[in-house]
Image (cartoon, helix red, strand yellow):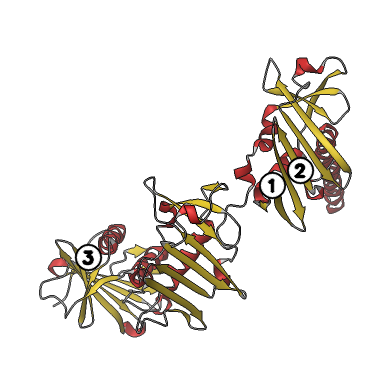
């Protein structure tokens, strides 16, 4: 076949492909979108809605948009959870009509004489409303009516779910507005005991506690946790005075962006809850005490007690010295980590081990290294096999000890056991405990 004919066939093939994509794929997609648009109950976009009023029998909930944020305006004035309101609005403007059932006639037979739910809303297109009646006798359909049109329409019952949100769901339940990276000071008062942490150029510190190393990660975890704690209930009929908040049990204060936000907590009740007030809104709320477990109880809870520091990028060799003189070495090369006998390890395995070593925390500083043999010892080597760090682990009845240099440490929590388990798994991945260490 001549090159000219090949070129012609190729051009025809490309033209047919383009035709199929433009007229079949895109055309089908466009037709589906047009069909869906034609079925929409309201031809309104969610961002254009600025007010929603939900009526259920004798109760009413109204929310209004101010700029980009929503607020509850009825039955009380309170900040709204913008995500929940946006979900409601998106659901409202996405309802699709399955079919028209009737026009005029007796509306009571469809549950629309006295609707169980009425939703009124304002958009750029004007005022609109939705009346919700009874369920269809077959399937999961629900009868609705759009404004005063007197046309009974059938929609999927599931499409009305977003409209069933309660006042609690629509209210803003957050305790602070400051984001973790905006906080410059964290203060916690528990009676006469206080903890004051300040963020400076060098990170977090405790100015009133000399010599305390503050863990950046622990403070970050506390602030992130506080951002997601929510009010469990709004006690709108209570006052701070009759809720045990005249003399709070705990006071948490965040400073940042030129403002201070506080959370005052009453003593815990028998059900494990605390009444609380926050500076970002009026009224008393209820908070689960279990949601506050991350709050530091003392300086020790934010203290940096790590004791192994090294740069993983500068580690080019790892040596495991095991019981009875067994040794296993790995050297970093272009193709990964390998032992002299050809055993290999994936890079992520050793990277994970490095991170576990760096994250180890001591419970207590002890004297010099123990005299007995360790369970194992890990030595990190730099270029030319220069020793960067050596740490040995010893089993005790109540946990593990670690010795680095001329000092030993009892390890906090499960850190020692988890590391031993991890190293054991590393050695299994490597295919065995290694060779006898040369004298």
Dividing the picture into quadrants, the one containing residue 435 is bottom left
Please tell me how crowded label 1 is: few (under 14), some (14-19), or many (20+) other residues with Cα within 10 Å. Answer: many
Q: Are marks 1 and 3 in contact (CB under 8 Å)?
A: no
Q: Are marks 2 and 1 in contact (CB under 8 Å)?
A: yes
Q: Label 3: which residue?
A: 434
Which of the pair 406/3 is nearer the observer? 406
Point out residue 192 in the picture as x, y percentages from the top left corner.
36, 71
Point out residue 396 in the picture as x, y percentages from the top left corner.
15, 64
- Distance (Cα) linking label 1 and label 3: 62 Å
For label 3, the SS is: loop
Q: Sequence-wise, which precedes: disc 1 or disc 3? A: 1
Compared with 257, 15 (above or below) is above
Q: Label 2: which residue?
A: 52
Q: Sequence-wise, which precedes: disc 2 or disc 3? A: 2
Compared with 132, 175 (above or below) is below
Which of the pair 357/339 is nearer the observer? 357
Q: Residue at x 44, y 55 (%)?
A: 244
Dividing the picture into quadrants, the one containing residue 140 is top right
Q: Residue furthest left?
A: 372
Number of numbered discs visible in the structure rendering: 3
């Amino acid at each position: 076949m001549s090159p000219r004919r090949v070129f012609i066939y190729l051009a025809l093939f490309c033209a047919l492909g383009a035709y199929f994509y433009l007229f079949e794929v895109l055309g089908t997609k466009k037709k589906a979108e047009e069909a869906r648009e034609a079925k929409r109950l309201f031809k309104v976009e969610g961002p254009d809605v600025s007010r929603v009023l939900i009526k259920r029998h004798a109760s009413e909930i109204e929310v209004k948009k101010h700029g980009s944020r929503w607020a509850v305006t009825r039955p009380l004035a309170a900040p709204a959870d913008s995500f929940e309101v946006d979900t409601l609005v998106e659901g409202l403007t996405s309802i699709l009509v399955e079919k028209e059932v009737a026009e005029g006639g007796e509306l009571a037979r469809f549950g629309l004489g006295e609707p169980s739910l009425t939703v009124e809303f304002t958009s750029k297109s004007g005022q609109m409303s939705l009346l919700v009646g009874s369920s269809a006798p077959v399937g999961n359909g629900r009868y609705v009516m759009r404004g005063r049109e007197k046309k009974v329409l059938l929609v999927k019952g599931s499409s009305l779910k977003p409209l069933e949100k309660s006042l609690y769901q629509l209210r803003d339940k957050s305790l602070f507005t400051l984001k973790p990276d905006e906080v410059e000071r964290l203060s916690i008062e528990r009676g006469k005991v206080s903890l004051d942490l300040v963020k400076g150029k060098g990170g977090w510190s405790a100015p009133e506690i000399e010599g305390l190393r503050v863990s950046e990660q622990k403070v970050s975890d506390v602030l992130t946790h506080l951002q997601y704690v929510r009010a469990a209930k709004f006690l709108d009929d209570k006052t701070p005075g009759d809720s045990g908040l005249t003399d709070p049990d705990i006071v948490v204060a965040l400073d940042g962006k030129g403002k201070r936000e506080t959370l005052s907590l009453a003593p815990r009740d028998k059900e494990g809850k605390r009444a609380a007030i926050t500076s970002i809104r009026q009224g008393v709320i209820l908070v689960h005490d279990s949601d506050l477990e991350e709050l530091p109880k003392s300086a020790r809870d934010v203290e940096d007690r790590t004791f192994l520091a090294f740069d993983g990028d500068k580690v080019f060799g790892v040596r495991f010295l095991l019981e009875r003189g067994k040794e296993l070495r790995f050297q970093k090369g272009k193709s990964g980590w390998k032992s002299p006998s050809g055993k290999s390890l994936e890079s992520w395995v050793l990277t994970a081990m490095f991170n576990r070593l760096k994250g180890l925390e001591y419970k207590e500083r002890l004297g010099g290294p123990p005299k007995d043999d360790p369970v194992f010892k890990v030595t990190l080597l730099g270029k030319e096999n220069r020793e960067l760090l050596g740490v040995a682990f010893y089993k005790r009845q109540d946990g593990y000890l670690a010795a680095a240099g001329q000092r030993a440490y009892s390890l906090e929590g499960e850190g020692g056991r988890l590391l031993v388990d991890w190293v054991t798994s590393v050695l299994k991945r490597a295919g065995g405990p290694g060779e006898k260490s040369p004298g």
